[in-house]
Image (tube, rainbow, N blue to C red):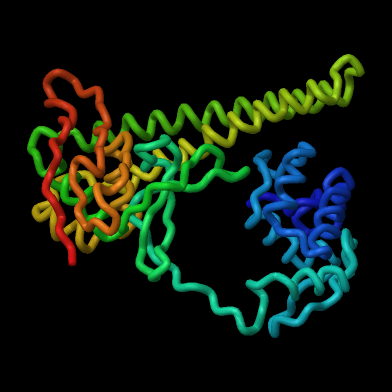
Amino acid sequence: MPRLYGFDDMAYQRVRESEAAPLRQAASRRLQQQTYEAITTWMNAEGYRTTRGGPWRPSVLANLLDHPAIAGLFEDANGNLVDSGGPRIIQPEEFKTIRAIRPLNSPTHRRADQREYLMPGGLTDCGLCGGMFGSSPANSGSRGYRCLPNRPQHPGGCGKVRINADLFETYVAEHVVAELAKPEVSVLIAQARDEVLAEASELRARVKADKARQKKLGESYARSPELSLSAFRAADKRLAEQIRENAAQARFLEQVRHVPVGDVPDLVRWWRHAPLASKQGVLTLMLERVSVYPAAARGSRTVDGDRVALTWRKWNPSSDKGTAPSAQGDGDRLEGA
């Protein structure tokens, strides 16, 4: 569990001043009702990083500013704020004001129902721009996916392509289960899973090495007057980006550990009742990429090979163990009302 930003210890007794200063500035900006997105854009531009070394995101900052410890408080069993006796980075009155203006803490606010989405993050991209796809309910409330629009936290997306989640997930699942049912593919599952997990382990090793380099860089900057602040920030930023990207890819690949190994008599039945993590593990194992293109006509309920392109993961089986998954054709059309 990472430490809380602004503190050196998990007991919240020792303040880290190098982090307390930007935290106070962030709180001050929030008290002026600046948005979390605007505040994190400023923090990232100034070179401030989270305790994990990554860039700030609105949700991360919102949770930090909602943590009572930053004001020397804690919540008792009844949810009341009580003085903890610990140090205060911001004043209790400031904390209570920030908490009061956060919509999530409003007594009348009801959290939206959590809905499951099958497609793992990082697997699907936009066929138009190559940007990342993410879950995004339609205005009607139905589940959906879309190309994430261009923002400081998610640069590059066009935001123009959407697809109904039920139709999209059904199309992908049908093709994956059909491929998985092939005898020459099923015998390779265990080997393929081990290969993907080995790749994830390599990425974890890179993350560990880069974190060590990042720490050494900080120590070098503290000792050496020859390293300028701008050079230090540039190098630190590059390392932080590498760490974030490799860690995200490792988490993505590690989903395959949930893939069942051995005979599954009825794959369709298994898929229907399998845990979400197991389904996502299968998708990660079988697919390299899923690209979604615009619908042929506005409001179209047809999903086929022209709309969704499946790129199958290429395995490296031994010559006596069969072949890797083959490319699919256009597939069937899914008609909806």
| Image location of residue 83, percent across then percent down | 86, 74
Q: Is residue 14 visible?
A: no
Q: In which quarter of the image is residue 208?
A: top right
Relative to residue 15, is residue 297 drawn left or right?
left
Query: Relative to 297, is 209 above or below?
Result: above
Q: Can residue 103 be seen in this view?
A: yes
Q: Quadrant of residue 329?
A: top left
Q: In which quarter of the image is residue 326?
A: top left
Query: Relative to 94, is 175 above or below?
Result: above
Name the residue rendered at 49%, 29% in the picture: 203
Name the residue rendered at 19%, 20% in the picture: 318
Task: Point out the residue furthest to the top here.
Answer: 226
Name the residue rendered at 21%, 55% in the picture: 170
Relative to residue 258, is residue 322 drawn left or right?
left
Residue in front for this viewpoint, 206 or 226:
226
Numbered label tally: 0
| Image location of residue 2, percent across then percent down | 67, 49
Query: Relative to 74, is 30 above or below?
Result: above
Name the residue rendered at 39%, 70% in the picture: 141
| Image location of residue 176, percent across then percent down | 19, 45
